[in-house]
Image (tube, helix red, strand yellow):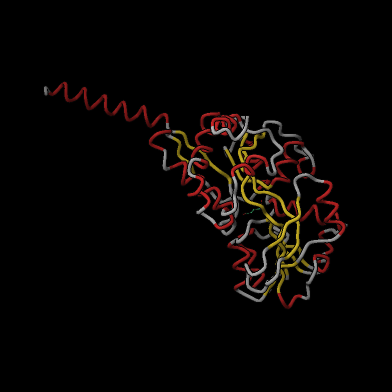
């Protein structure tokens, strides 16, 4: 081959490579603390998406974040494309209610699919004298970081009980990944977390020191469940964590995967396809995913309209009409 031909060939290869590069699409999924399950949800979705990068050119990352409310706000601001969020906060963000009253409704919010159930979980030190949720009053409690869904749901419960921050001896705002250590260092008497089970945080809290899971039940909780579609009765299975041998009653939400109309149809379609075409593999990536069912993931905890890209995949599979 003549030199100029070689040069032209090389140049066109470089151009072709640049063209492919230019089409690469980077997407970010907001998760939660590193010892929670949201982090694994995001990492698992990205793992499956990134296996197909050579065909669809999408590159996915899932950094640790403050949790549900932070994720929804970041999607709204355009800082994240997708995120994991509790079903109660999906509902309130869409409608501009509760914590989202000030910022207003977010009608562009879209549901992609639901993931695992998340019981509202309270863990107390064995020496704290805490046996029921009401015993938290007057104690040192980590009510979780602002931006987390757990913090939001704890504030709803405080509202139901008529408690203010000043009703606790201490109301700390540590992030989920920091709270097990604070509990076991005796800096707080109890921690709260809306989380799938088993979770790293609760495992750490129940194995590093003597502690147990506390029930959250009674007439007020029954009313919360009856009045709000995004809550349901839930329990933490006995025997899953050291110190808690029987099932513990509480209430819970769903972890949901959300985005907005800003994310294009093709991208969401590819993300949903990566998960649902590899469903068994996805379920194997965390024990909290083991009981997931496709049909439930399309309906449970969903209040926002389904994203067009997700709807396209579900229709193709005959999961919806
Ligand atoms: N539901 C929690 C929250 O939004 C996060 C749970 C997790 O990290 O798995 O704060």
Q: Position of residue 117 (x, y in %)?
A: 66, 52
Looking at the image, residue 313 sits to the left or right of residue 111; the answer is: left
Residue at the image point whose x is 84% and y is 58% from the top: 164
Q: For the C terminus, give its image quadrant.
A: top right
Image quadrant assignment for residue 310: top right
Residue at the image point whose x is 19% and y is 25% from the top: 7
Q: Position of residue 69 (x, y in %)?
A: 68, 46
Q: Which of 220 and 176 lies nearest the eye of the viewer?
A: 220
Image quadrant assignment for residue 109: top right
Q: For the N terminus, give its image quadrant.
A: top left
Q: Which of 143 and 222 lies nearest the eye of the viewer?
A: 222
Q: Position of residue 298 (x, y in %)?
A: 63, 40
Looking at the image, residue 52 sits to the left or right of residue 236; the answer is: left
Image quadrant assignment for residue 55: top left
Q: State the count of labels.
A: 0
Residue at the image point whose x is 51% and y is 45% from the top: 279
Residue at the image point whose x is 16% and y is 21% from the top: 5
Please identify the residue farthest to the bottom as the structure is shown.
Answer: 127
Q: Position of residue 137 (x, y in %)?
A: 83, 66
Please identify the residue farthest to the left as the structure is shown.
Answer: 2
Q: Is residue 249 above or below residue 60?
A: below
Q: Which of 232 and 44 lies nearest the eye of the viewer?
A: 232
Looking at the image, residue 122 sits to the left or right of residue 3; the answer is: right
Q: Which of 30 and 228 lies nearest the eye of the viewer?
A: 228
């Amino acid at each position: 081959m003549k030199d100029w031909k070689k040069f032209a060939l090389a140049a066109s290869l470089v151009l072709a490579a640049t063209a492919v590069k230019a089409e690469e699409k980077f997407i970010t999924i907001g998760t939660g603390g590193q010892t929670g399950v949201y982090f694994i949800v995001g990492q698992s979705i990205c793992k499956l998406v990134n296996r197909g990068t050579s065909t669809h050119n999408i590159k996915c990352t899932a950094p640790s974040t403050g949790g549900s409310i932070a994720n929804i706000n970041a999607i709204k601001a355009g800082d994240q494309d997708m995120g994991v969020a509790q079903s109660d906060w999906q509902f309130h963000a869409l409608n501009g209610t509760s914590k989202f009253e000030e910022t207003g409704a977010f009608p562009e919010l879209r549901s992609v699919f639901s993931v695992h159930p998340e019981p509202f979980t309270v863990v107390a030190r064995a020496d704290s004298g805490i046996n029921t949720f009401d015993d938290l009053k007057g104690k040192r409690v980590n009510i979780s970081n602002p931006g987390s869904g757990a913090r939001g749901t704890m504030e709803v419960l405080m509202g139901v009980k008529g408690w203010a921050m000043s009703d606790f001896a201490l109301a700390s705002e540590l992030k989920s990944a920091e709270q097990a250590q604070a509990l076991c260092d005796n800096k707080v008497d109890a921690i709260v977390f809306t989380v799938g089970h088993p979770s790293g945080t609760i495992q750490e809290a129940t194995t590093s020191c003597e502690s147990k899971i506390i029930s959250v039940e009674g007439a007020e909780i029954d009313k919360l469940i009856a009045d709000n579609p995004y809550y349901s009765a839930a329990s933490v299975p006995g025997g899953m964590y050291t110190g808690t041998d029987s099932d513990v009653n509480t209430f819970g939400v769903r972890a949901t995967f959300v985005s907005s109309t800003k994310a294009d149809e093709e991208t969401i379609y590819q993300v949903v396809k990566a998960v649902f075409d590899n469903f068994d593999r996805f379920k194997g990536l965390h024990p909290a995913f083991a009981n997931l069912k496709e049909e439930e993931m399309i309906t449970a905890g969903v209040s926002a309209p389904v994203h067009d890209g997700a709807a396209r995949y579900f229709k193709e599979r005959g999961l919806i009409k």
